[in-house]
Structure formats: C-alpha cells, structure tokens
Amino acid sequence: MRIVIAGGRTQADFLIGTLKKQKHKIVVINEEEQYANYLSATHGIPVFVGDPSKYFILNEANIEHFDVLIALTHRDADNLAICQYAKRCFGVKRCICTVANPKNVDLFRELGVNTVISSTHMISQYITQATTLENLIRTMTFEDDRVVISEIVVEEDYECVNKSLIDITLPPNTIIGCIIRKSSDMVVPTGTDVIRAGDKLLMLSSPENQKKAIAAITR
C-alpha cells in the first residue's frame, strides 16, 4: 500500500519502522526540520519538511490517490484539515488521525475521517467494557466501529459448555468465527461443533448486540 505519515514524533518513528518491514511505500511529512532529518537518517527515506496541514505541502509530497493517510500532529484542528485535504483534494482513500480531545472523536467521524483515535476515549471504553463484560479479554472494532470482535475464554460453569453451536441462540448479526483450543491450533466452527471449557472463542457482532452475544455464551 501507499501510505502517508503526516506529523508526529515517536508515533511516526514507530510506524515508519513497522510499515517499512511490511514493504509498504511510505511518504513522510514533518514540520520539524530537526526531527525530519532524524527520521530520514534513521529509516533511510526522504522526508518532506513542512506543515502537512497546508495544501501546497501535501501537493509537493505528491500523495495523489494514496491508499492511506495517517495524521499525527499534536493539534486536532490540523489533523482534521490534513485528512479533509487528503480526501477531497488528493483522492486519498482512507484517512486516520489521532485527537487529544476525546470529544472530537464523533465529530471528526461525521466530518469524513475514517478512523479517529483518542487514547482517553479508548481507555474510557475499555474501563466501561471491563466492568460490565465478564471474562472479556479483548475487544477490537473494525470498519468504523460497525464490526466488533470479542475474545472470550469459556469457563466450566458457562451455559454453553458441551453444547453444539446450533443449540446456542445468538442475537442477530453475530457469529462465532473461530475456536482456539489447546489440543489443536484453531477450529473454524460449523453448527455441529461442541464448545468446551477452556475454549477461546472469537466472536463477531455488531456493537449494539455485543453484550447480548456475550451473555448468550457466559450466562
């Protein structure tokens, strides 16, 4: 993929290293000349020096029709401007940005940013989920929060133990996509597969049905 990384310091440094290993084409824009020189020397790639929230800087970086842009500046307004320029003026397919103010998460999504990341917002969501969803080890969201993957470890006293999947009533838009079992690497289940204590289930659901889906397994 062709990916633009706009702004950022340690986050940009980490992402560049990770994406280079995966053989993606990377364009980096950073307004701090000293840090831009560091990124260029460390990763052996050219780095455009300039404010990525300015149209002419994005134009000079030649990002037309790139697959992804990631905006990492410390100013929320600049990240929004970068994403909007990228999508509207340069045809970038998908934009991701970080925000300092968690209140901007929903607003930026409404304004067209595909993925908005707030550490404060993520932590508050995790705390809420962790206090209401027992034995939920991890939750991930995809496709702009339209799909939730829940990872559940099945305890011995769960109602689902020793039942076939076909005998478990799950809410709409929910499916158990994978069973990870100690005795085998991974099972892609069919309706006749039986859930056992100790199984780790990967369950796909819509966000609104996540709690009902977990309750169907854990109750």
Image (tube, helix red, strand yellow):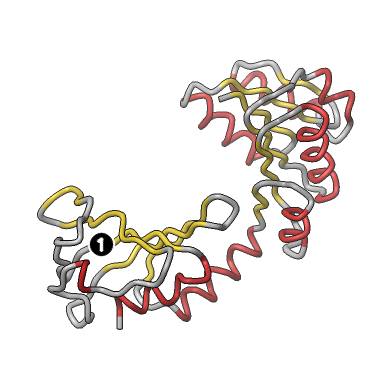
Looking at the image, which residue is at 27% across and 54% down?
Answer: 178
Q: Residues within 10 Å of mark 1 (few under 14, many from 20)?
A: many
Is 138 left or right of 190, judged from the image as shown? right
179, 35: nearer the viewer = 179
Q: Position of residue 53 (x, y in %)?
A: 85, 36
Vertical arrangement, residue 60 with respect to residue 101, above or below: above
State the count of labels: 1
53, 158: nearer the viewer = 158
Looking at the image, which residue is at 76% across and 53% down?
Answer: 108
Place residue 210 in its image quadrant.
Answer: bottom left
Q: Where is residue 121 in the image (x, y as percent from the top left)?
A: 65, 64
Is 198 left or right of 44, judged from the image as shown? left
Vertical arrangement, residue 78 with respect to residue 38, above or below: below
168, 84: nearer the viewer = 168
Q: Position of residue 37 (x, y in %)?
A: 73, 22
Q: Is mark 1 on a helix, strand or loop?
A: strand
According to the image, label 1 marks what residue? Answer: 200
Is 2 left or right of 7, judged from the image as shown? left
Place residue 66 in its image quadrant.
Answer: top right
Q: Position of residue 51 (x, y in %)?
A: 85, 31
Badge 1 amino acid: Lys
Question: Which part of the image, by quadrant, shows the C terminus?
Answer: bottom left
Looking at the image, which residue is at 72% across and 47% down?
Answer: 113
Is 89 left or right of 215, judged from the image as shown? right
